[in-house]
């Protein structure tokens, strides 16, 4: 089966609707020294999925591990937000802040799977 141009265009318009970026800023004495007082922006890929009537941000489990490890080293990670402007027809082009620390995180890391889920607790 080969894809037609219409199939490809439909997929190109539909698939990015569920893709979002999660971003935050990292600050530590070392980062601020190296970047002349400017925090380091961190960006992670994710997608949105509804599970049992709960909307979740789904990312890689190692992303959640990275955030935990950086915080354990003393790096301050803050100003978490999502952006869903990847789709051509996206009506939302602004960042949406959310409380990363509030919802519990779910990690799946077995049998080659590496997922992390964050129940959405969005604030504006």
Image: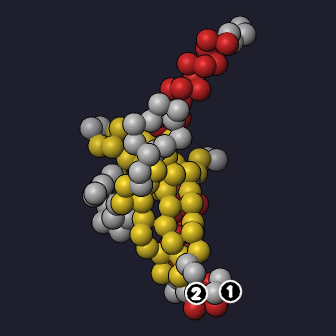
- Location of mark 1 (residue): 34
Q: Nearer the viewer, residue 22 or 69?
A: 22
Residue 87 in picture, x, y percent from top left? 51, 35
Does residue 35 appear left or right of residue 19 in this picture?
A: right
- Tell me the mark number nearer the camera, choosing from 2 and 1: 2
Colour scheme of the rendered structure? secondary structure
Q: Nearer the viewer, residue 105 or 10?
A: 10
Q: Badge 2, how many Cα within 10 Å: few under 14, some, many 20+?
A: few
| Mark 2 in CB contact with mark 1 (< 8 angstroms) | no
Residue in view at x 60 percent, y 19 percent: 9
Residue 32 seen by the camera = yes
Task: Name the disc covering residue 110, or none.
Answer: none
Compared to 98, does 30 lie above or below?
Answer: below
Q: Which of 44 and 64 is in front in this view?
A: 44
Q: In which quarter of the image is residue 70?
A: bottom right
Residue in view at x 56 percent, y 19 percent: 10
Q: Badge 1, how many Cα within 10 Å: few under 14, some, many 20+?
A: few
Task: Name the disc covering residue 37, or none.
Answer: 2
Quadrant including the C terminus? bottom left
Gap in Å between the C-alphas at discs 2 and 1? Answer: 8 Å
Does residue 107 appear left or right of residue 8 in this picture?
A: left
Compared to 29, does 17 lie above or below?
Answer: above
């Amino acid at each position: 089966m080969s894809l037609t141009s219409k199939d490809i265009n439909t997929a190109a318009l539909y698939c990015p609707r569920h893709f979002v970026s999660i971003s935050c800023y990292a600050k530590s004495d070392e980062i601020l020294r190296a970047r002349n007082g400017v925090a380091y922006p961190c960006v992670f890929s994710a997608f949105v999925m509804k599970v049992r009537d709960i909307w979740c941000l789904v990312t890689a489990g190692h992303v959640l591990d990275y955030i935990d490890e950086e915080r354990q080293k003393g790096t301050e990670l803050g100003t978490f937000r999502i952006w869903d402007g990847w789709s051509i027809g996206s009506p939302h082009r602004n960042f949406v802040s959310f409380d990363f620390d509030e919802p519990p995180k779910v990690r799946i890391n077995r049998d080659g799977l590496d997922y992390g889920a964050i129940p959405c607790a969005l604030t504006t």
